[in-house]
């Protein structure tokens, strides 16, 4: 994930025999655009922009006519005149990058930490404002290496973006949640948009040409896009904390919720439909977290991380100045996390989790207390406009399923009982010797908080009303509140220690390795090199590409049952298609969320594909990158053309992409 | 894997609502046949027999004309007249089963163990001979539960078996070794044979009808065939020994050999071709052993096994007679294995492994010594006609690649050096402080044993010639021999203890559970129930079936590269086929090697498929059965008909199968 002002030219030349000159880099940079939450690229001389289907979802919904959902039907403009403007959509084109670290360092003169932050923020504001004024561009100061480098990114922003073509969501997300994060895959996850300027398609300027054949196995390809966030600079202690404490608890919580939702779902066909997406969503989250955890549990991967950390610390310790500045950061983090571990179980249960009703009761109890404090002494969620937001949430009446409340609360209390020591004050306060099921039933049946006006009256009544209330949920919440507040007081300084020292380590990375180690992802433009490559899977190999044959195969394998059903367009097109056309393919490039919609280009900067996902073995890359079996999954350029011409009858768009 | 004289009728009725009557069971039994090493079934009124392609391999090779290989081209008889007789092939049809345990028990009257075995063997011979004479059938006494039950199996043997049709090996074994033991899979692994009697197709008698539609997901299916061997009655201690000692060493050995063969293979294109199959074969063995090991390393599976063993021992201990007879067997095995563990590393290296030349030298040294002993005191391989066989092997000149000899011996010696203690006498004898590479080079370059006449002369010269030899390999072998002999002396009584007590446990199983636990596999006819079922894989689901689409997909995914290349017939047929026809499918039935060629039938005893493999998750079932993700892989009945009609132009055979 290299930044465009520090590409590893020597490494590329050595590894691939590829020499990128400045012209190549500038052309690629100017052909890439960032859109809300995603990446994209300009792919024709008339401003056609390519991204993923899921990146254009809000536009697709917004421009659908009242009686039709383009999510379901797809959309193909018959000509430019039919292209539909996407409300609120923009595209940012990166014009230039400037290192502003010295200016920001110069501005930070205080020795007081709070004052330092103010000085830094004010320098960043000044630089941004000055740049906006001077250039008319959209300027942003980006913090790399958690403060090791500050760069000024200048973007040209295009505000008139129109929808040209999207496939049906079912074709873009074929296989749905079960196949999400997996490969082999059969998704046409594309969207085509167009940049307009002054009401006309933008013409001229840089754009990526279309490759005649796409990429072959073993071929060098680049991904150009905006990776959102990685955790590769975390220390070993932080990764171990995630591995041992955070993720196991997260998975246990998902599992508890899933088991409740499955029970609810089994009540009736209507409930099955009602909870289907919740179940899929939870299973998808399980899949992702399990993937992260797999990497952290992988002893080889962790050994690599440990070796890196040893080398890193040795480099810092070898220089007395660096040692004095950064040398203590790792132990400081490790110590803080050791302390956090000692009450991590309490941290999971002291609070108002497990039931929406209990959550509302907790807020009703805490709001008067927090409101009475100065902002800086409040708990995080109650700062700033938190109080107002919370009040609105408490009074907004949502639908509450009492059966669900009872079951989730029971599950939460059962988990608390099995994890906390028997004499823990939380158990005493909430259960008092009764069973979780009995307590949950009594609380949910006995409370009046299901009524929004009752909640509003309690809010209005303030501390005295809360104190006087005999509502069983308020009574319990009053007992839990001091436990939570006490724990938060213990936790707050430890969290600050971790955050401050993580920032030091970020700077130390840059001090020790300079630009030879790319910074963690920042949702700004990066370029990543890799090759098209099969990988060992399931006792055999996952092929480097899939084909249209495979799409029809997977549908037929499941008897065309959702989410493996073909759309009518695809079902009809089968006899027209060359079924051996590549559909998706995999590469060793390094991407992460935010890279969705990134173009894959060959050494001639021609489009060979469109990144849309990673395989399941790729999930651990969030923390430790490895390309042994982790892969980027992309739509193949040849598949896009074949589908446009034969499934979507969009020859004019295919011609435009192919420069005909 | 139920025997036909003890099917779990109540269990089937309870689980599937399926009531099998004696007529159904007899019909199914008489429709099944056993062929050499495989299972098969009669599938038409004119004696057509269906099995796997790989079960007919020797016949296919034998009947190929001089200028053609039917392995490559496939074979389709245009009519019955063209069917080709398979030399040496037979088919056994099970006529009846009789429990002969009482008669054998009655014959064993001695208290001496050796005499007991003789009495038992002689009773078995008598029963078999008497049955052969009386019935004209082929009779066999089968030992179940390692001696808990003896049954007389009476077979009708058919000796005139002819080849009707086989696909090309590439279609039957599409995906080759990489896809072996995996699923999703796309193999047309069938062969069609015919039983002839008196020179004419056998007509009449029981046969399995063809299902009109094949099986749907969730449907009950039975596998009827001859599973070869399972290790489910092994004790926990035996499984732990395999897990901790045997399999890791096996895998290390495969890895050593592989790394050598890969080096040799990299020397030239000719070497690549020469060693290609060796590499695939080794990788396949790795895959299998890794699969077994995965099961033994699976804590949940092992916990189930441990719980079973506790229950089993409790049942035995609860009955004083059983306790006296069997109660000590588990600890006796565990103690013996603990002792074996103490010299397992020595056991791996004390000997003549790692080089064919060293192996020959070892035999030359040992043969005169062993020949001088009475048979019962010799090491196992030298007993019976072992001496003659060994001498023939030693003098038979095979091609020896000195480079391979040097590399494999180096690898063996390096492994010995890294595993044995530094002062181990083997290292002292063989290396004497030099490096493995130097020793291997000196031995391989210095020996004359590559010359068969030199080896023959040493054999002829007997002990004195061996003693006088200065050939460096003979010198080393003379030093190794006493180490090996000493170790064998320590090992022999321990192995006997394990074997004797394992037999007791086999009998104890029957005593404790009767027929409610089916006996371990014995390559005799069994019936296994299961359902057609998808399973979780790779973050999503493996579908319950694959289709012809998938075959063309997997070929296209790999650019038609071997072993995923289509045969000319299949490449040409693509436009004629209904590509959504099912090709292979998976079920939860319990099978193992020997079941290859078994029919899958529905509750109407109609053919719905043909078993040919298990998925990779199925390999642990050798020791502990589980159907969570382990699956039987079968060819689908509809795929067989579609291929016969449209790929192989064999309508007359398809008509016969479908009873038209």
Image (cartoon, coloured by chain):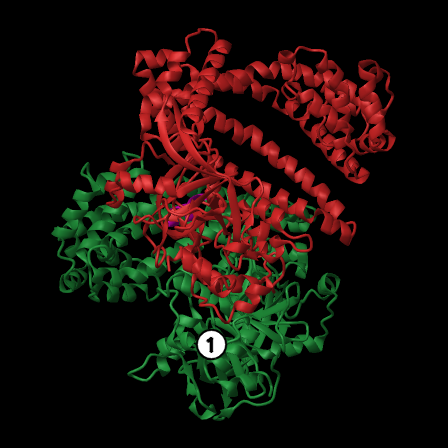
Chain colours: A green, B red
Q: Nearer the viewer, residue B191 or B540?
A: B191
Q: Chain of mark 1?
A: A
Q: Position of residue B272 (x, y in %)?
A: 73, 51
Looking at the image, residue B137 sits to the left or right of residue A7; the answer is left
Main SS type for the magenta part? helix
Q: Residue at point 74% right, 20% down?
A: B480
Which residues are the magenta region?
A: A244-251
Q: x, y (%) of residue B534? A: 39, 53
Farthest top residue? B111
Q: Quadrant of residue A133?
A: bottom right
The answer to whether one can see residue A185 in this image is no
Query: Which structural element holds mark 1?
Result: loop
The quadrant the N terminus of chain A occupies is: bottom right
Q: Is residue A550 visible?
A: yes
Left or right of B545, for residue A148: right
The foreground one among B113 and A181 is B113
Q: Residues within 10 Å of mark 1 (few under 14, many from 20)?
A: few
Q: Is residue B42 magenta?
A: no
Q: Is residue B24 above or below residue A9?
A: above
- Give x and y (percent) for residue A558: 39, 61
Judge by depth and name the residue closer to the eye, B552 or A251.
Answer: B552
Residue that carries the numbered disc 1 in the rendered image: A575
């Amino acid at each position: 994930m290299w930044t465009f002002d520090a590409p590893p030219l020597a490494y590329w030349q050595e590894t691939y025999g590829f020499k990128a000159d400045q012209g190549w880099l500038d052309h690629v940079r100017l052909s890439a655009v960032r859109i809300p939450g995603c990446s994209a690229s300009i792919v024709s001389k008339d401003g056609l922009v390519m991204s993923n289907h899921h990146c254009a979802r809000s536009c697709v919904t917004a421009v659908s006519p009242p009686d039709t959902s383009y999510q379901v039907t797809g959309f193909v403009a018959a000509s430019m005149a039919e292209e539909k403007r996407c409300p609120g959509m923009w595209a940012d084109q990166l014009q230039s990058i400037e290192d502003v670290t010295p200016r920001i360092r110069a501005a930070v003169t205080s020795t007081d930490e709070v004052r330092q932050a103010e000085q830094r923020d004010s320098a960043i504001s000044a630089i941004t404002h000055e740049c906006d004024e001077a250039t008319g561009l959209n300027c942003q100061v980006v913090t790399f290496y958690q403060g090791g480098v500050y760069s000024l990114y200048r973007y040209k922003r295009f505000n008139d973006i129109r929808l040209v073509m999207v496939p049906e969501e079912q074709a873009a997300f074929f296989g749905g949640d079960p196949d999400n994060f997996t490969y082999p895959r059969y998704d046409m996850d594309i969207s085509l948009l167009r940049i307009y300027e002054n009401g006309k398609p933008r013409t001229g300027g840089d754009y990526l040409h279309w490759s005649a054949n796409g990429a072959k196995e073993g071929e060098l390809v680049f991904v150009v896009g905006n990776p959102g966030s990685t955790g590769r600079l975390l220390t070993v202690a932080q990764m171990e904390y995630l591995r041992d404490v955070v993720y196991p608890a997260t998975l246990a919580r998902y599992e508890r919720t899933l088991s409740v939702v499955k029970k609810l779902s089994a009540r009736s066909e209507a409930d099955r439909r009602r909870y289907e997406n919740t179940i899929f969503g939870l299973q998808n989250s399980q899949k992702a977290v399990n993937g992260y955890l797999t990497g952290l549990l992988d002893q080889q991967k962790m050994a690599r991380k440990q070796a890196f950390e040893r080398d890193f610390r040795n480099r810092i310790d070898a220089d007395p100045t660096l040692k004095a500045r950064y040398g203590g950061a790792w132990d400081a983090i490790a110590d803080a996390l050791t302390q956090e571990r000692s009450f991590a179980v309490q941290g999971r249960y002291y609070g108002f989790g497990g039931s929406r009703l209990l959550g509302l009761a907790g807020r009703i109890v805490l709001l008067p207390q927090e409101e009475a404090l100065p902002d800086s002494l409040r708990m995080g969620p109650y700062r700033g406009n938190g109080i107002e937001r919370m009040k609105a949430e408490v009074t907004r009446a949502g639908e509450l399923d009492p059966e669900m409340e009872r079951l989730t609360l029971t599950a939460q209390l059962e988990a608390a009982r099995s994890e906390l020591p028997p004499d823990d004050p939380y158990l005493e306060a909430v259960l008092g010797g009764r069973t979780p099921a009995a307590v949950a039933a009594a609380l949910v049946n006995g409370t009046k908080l299901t009524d929004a006006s009752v909640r509003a009256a309690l809010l209005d009544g303030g501390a005295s009303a809360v104190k006087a209330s005999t509502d069983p949920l308020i009574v319990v919440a009053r007992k839990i509140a001091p436990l939570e507040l006490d724990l938060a007081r213990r936790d707050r300084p430890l969290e600050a220690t971790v955050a401050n020292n993580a920032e030091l380590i970020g700077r130390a990375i840059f001090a020790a390795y300079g630009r030879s180690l790319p910074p963690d992802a920042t949702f700004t433009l990066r370029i990543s090199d890799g090759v098209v490559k099969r990988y060992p899977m399931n006792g055999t190999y996952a092929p480097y590409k899939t084909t249209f044959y495979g799409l029809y195969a997977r549908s037929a394998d499941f008897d065309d049952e959702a989410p493996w059903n073909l759309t009518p367009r695809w079902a009809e097109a089968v006899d027209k298609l060359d079924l051996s056309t590549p559909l998706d393919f995999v590469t060793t490039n390094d991407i992460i969320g935010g890279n969705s919609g990134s173009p894959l280009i060959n050494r001639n900067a021609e489009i060979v594909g469109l990144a849309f996902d990673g395989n399941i073995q790729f999930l651990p890359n969030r923390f430790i990158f490895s390309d042994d079996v982790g892969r980027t999954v992309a739509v193949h350029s040849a598949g896009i053309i074949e589908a446009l011409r034969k499934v979507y009858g969009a020859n004019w768009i295919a011609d435009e992409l192919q420069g005909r």
